[in-house]
Amino acid sequence: MTDASRITIHIVSSVDGIIAKQDNSVSWFETTDVYEKGVAGEDVDVAGFMKTIDCFVMGSRTYEHALELSRQYGWAYGDVPVVVVSARSLPVERHSVELYYGDLHTLVNDRIRPRYKNTWVAGGAELCKSFLRLKLADEIRISILPIILGKGLLFLDGLGLEQPLHLKNTTAYRNGMVELWYEIKK
Amino acid sequence: MTDASRITIHIVSSVDGIIAKQDNSVSWFETTDVYEKGVAGEDVDVAGFMKTIDCFVMGSRTYEHALELSRQYGWAYGDVPVVVVSARSLPVERHSVELYYGDLHTLVNDRIRPRYKNTWVAGGAELCKSFLRLKLADEIRISILPIILGKGLLFLDGLGLEQPLHLKNTTAYRNGMVELWYEIKK
């Protein structure tokens, strides 16, 4: 890996490490919490930040969920290239979306790293775990919302691999969300 | 609950929510990480902080583990009262240690709250979950170490209860540990 190409696993999680409720509902993303010391939403340049991401990689169910959400909220990834890792033939409605089925080393080293500087792996849990197991990611950013969900899909359950991290930054937001940003030690 | 008595669940966890390795080893508590912006260990008044805790509550296996560790590192809880919740008859080597077997509501409302201002529930996972399910705790503090363990005992696995939290504070330390401090919403 060179500094020219970074691959970041990003996940939004509850305090108990759950990234999806059993019914797939996302209303828990909207917290009712107020953390006075936190960075206010209006001070976060989301659009500017999104512009720094050159490529998203996601699994098939995450993609299907994003498609479903796009009917109500619009497509979350703009014109940024999205690679969907899937063995299934999924509907592709945008030029920016590309399906990929094959070896992840090949995807990352031959297709993503030469082309993109800043790639985000946006889920789901299985794809993120594959990236960790195959040592294909450089960073991991976990946004922890102020809620315990109690049941649902765990993010890193059953990874089976010990991986030391380096804390790179931490940011607390006004809505009670805390982002932990780690470098994955080589 | 009055301000006169707070019950805090405290846990040290990996990024993937694991609080104990399968072999119970604790060397992962000693991180090799350096987070330059974090609070340095020498600036943390551990002794002063420990003095603010009036009582510890723990489960039987956490107690047995603490006993085992005490042979090497000394008893971690000083002369502070420790209530061990257990149906088993465990060895008691200190005047400060008391065994309890019975209803947790009774323990908390009749014995702990009238007597102690600042009580910490120090684990394990099952006891912490019981405190959450029975709404007996006021706060939860999670110290997240910069490591993914990959397998071991999960902290909040199978809680089965949704619990909104209020972020109260967050502190990052020089060793890469981040403490998330939440109030448990009533």
Image (cartoon, coloured by chain):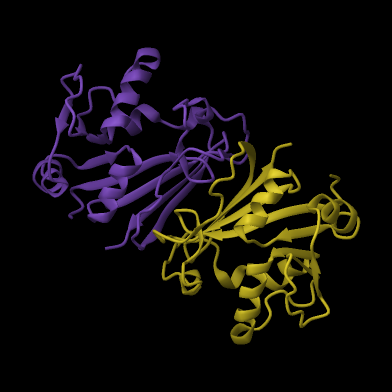
Chain colours: A yellow, B purple
A116 to the left or right of B8: right
B178 to the left or right of A181: left
Using the rendered image of the protein, determine whether residue B168 is visible from the camera's viewpoint: yes
The residue sitting at the front extreme is A88
The residue sitting at the top extreme is B71
Q: Which quadrant is the N terminus of chain B positioned in?
A: bottom left
The residue sitting at the left extreme is B110
Question: Residue A153 in the image: x percent, y percent?
Answer: 50, 59
As displayed, is residue B184 above or below residue B43?
below
Question: Residue B145 in the image: x percent, y percent?
Answer: 53, 38
Towards the viewer: A75 or A48: A75
B95 to the left or right of A162: left
Question: Residue B62 in the image: x percent, y percent?
Answer: 32, 31
Using the rendered image of the protein, determine whether residue A45 is visible from the camera's viewpoint: no
Question: Residue A111, located in which quarter of the rendered image?
Answer: bottom right
Q: Which quadrant is the C terminus of chain B positioned in?
A: bottom left
Question: Residue A95 in the image: x percent, y percent?
Answer: 83, 79
Residue shown at 63% from the left, 34% from the top: B34
Towards the viewer: B159 or A46: B159
Residue shown at 77% from the left, 59% from the top: A119
As displayed, is residue B23 above or below residue A129?
above
Question: Residue A78, located in which quarter of the rendered image?
Answer: bottom right
The image shows a total of numbered marks equal to 0
As displayed, is residue A99 above or below residue A136?
below
Residue shown at 47% from the left, 49% from the top: B170
